[in-house]
Image (spheres, grey):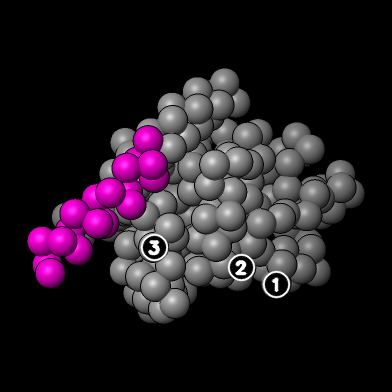
Amino acid sequence: MAGFASGAFLRLAEAIGASQSAEWTPSPAVEALRNRDPIAWTHLFEREAPAIYRYVIARVGSPEEAEDLVSRTFEEAWKHAEAFEDRGLPPRAWLFGIARHLTSSHRRRLFRQPPVLRLDVVEQAARERDPELLDLARAIARLPRADAEVVVLRFVHGLSAHETAAALGTTVDAVKSRQARALRKLRHALEAAPAERAGLAAKEG
């Protein structure tokens, strides 16, 4: 994890309730999912639905929309169960990819692209007025979308580089490149943030 802001990333994950770990699924369980075994799918839903919900609600802000999109994510996964491959990755990466696609498609139909991370969700959660946490969320919001996606999946939701690549439908090298570029920008933004806050406070005062 990025050392310069590891604490802030962890607090950001806690603020939106994101999970920082994913359970690997052994080959027999993968086959059970591919064969649409009801018990395997019940276990998958119970284990992963909360993480998918937290990912979606951080993008759409509405509990009703988030619940609907989580249901649609699992419906889509069930429909295309045979597409899930045993590549040594947990199903979470596959589910995140489906949820990301559905969320983007859903919001585009409403004439707007969903943010990677809604600032109001962070601001509501950061009731203790953690300035570093809000600085980080705002800096992520200013990143190019592709870079912000990588940062949020890697450091907020705890996916590995391989899992993130699978969720985004790209390569591990592309993920690492976007991550390095994004972290450089975040480092500069966080270094400048205290001075910016001080300037705003002086103007308001």
Overall secondary structure of the magenta stretch?
A: helix
Which span of residues is magenta-colored? Answer: 188-205
Nearer-N-terminus badge (3/2): 2
Does the magenta run of residues contain 195? Answer: yes
SS at mark 1?
Answer: helix
Identify the residue at horizontal 52%, vertical 55% (top origin): 8
Residue 132 image label: none
Q: Mark 2 falls on what kind of element?
A: helix
Crowding around mark 2 (Cα neighbors within 10 Å: few <14, some 14 to 19, many 20+) is some
Tell me which amino acid carries mark 1.
Glu
Which of pointers 1 and 3 indicates the residue nearer the eye? 3
Crowd band around label 3 with a 10 angstrom C-alpha radius: few (<14), some (14–19), many (20+): some
Query: Residue 28: x percent and y percent?
Result: 89, 49
Q: Residue at x 63, y 50 (%)?
A: 158
Q: Are marks 1 and 2 in contact (CB under 8 Å)?
A: yes
The residue that disc 1 covers is: 46
When the figure is inspected, residue 161 is found, relative to residue 176, above or below; the finding is below
Please state, as top left, top right, bottom left or bottom right, where the N terminus lies in the image.
top right
Question: Does 10 appear in magenta?
Answer: no
Q: Residue 131 got which mark?
A: 3
Q: Residue at x 44, y 43 (%)?
A: 149
Where's residue 47, x and y in %?
71, 67
Q: Which mark is residue 49?
A: 2
Residue type highlighted by circle 2: Ala
Vertical arrangement, residue 83 with respect to residue 138, above or below: above
- Toward which corner of the image does residue 49 lie, by quadrant? bottom right
Q: Quadrant of residue 75?
A: bottom right
Q: Residues within 10 Å of mark 1 (few under 14, many from 20)?
A: few
Q: Give the residue type that dot 3 points to.
A: Pro
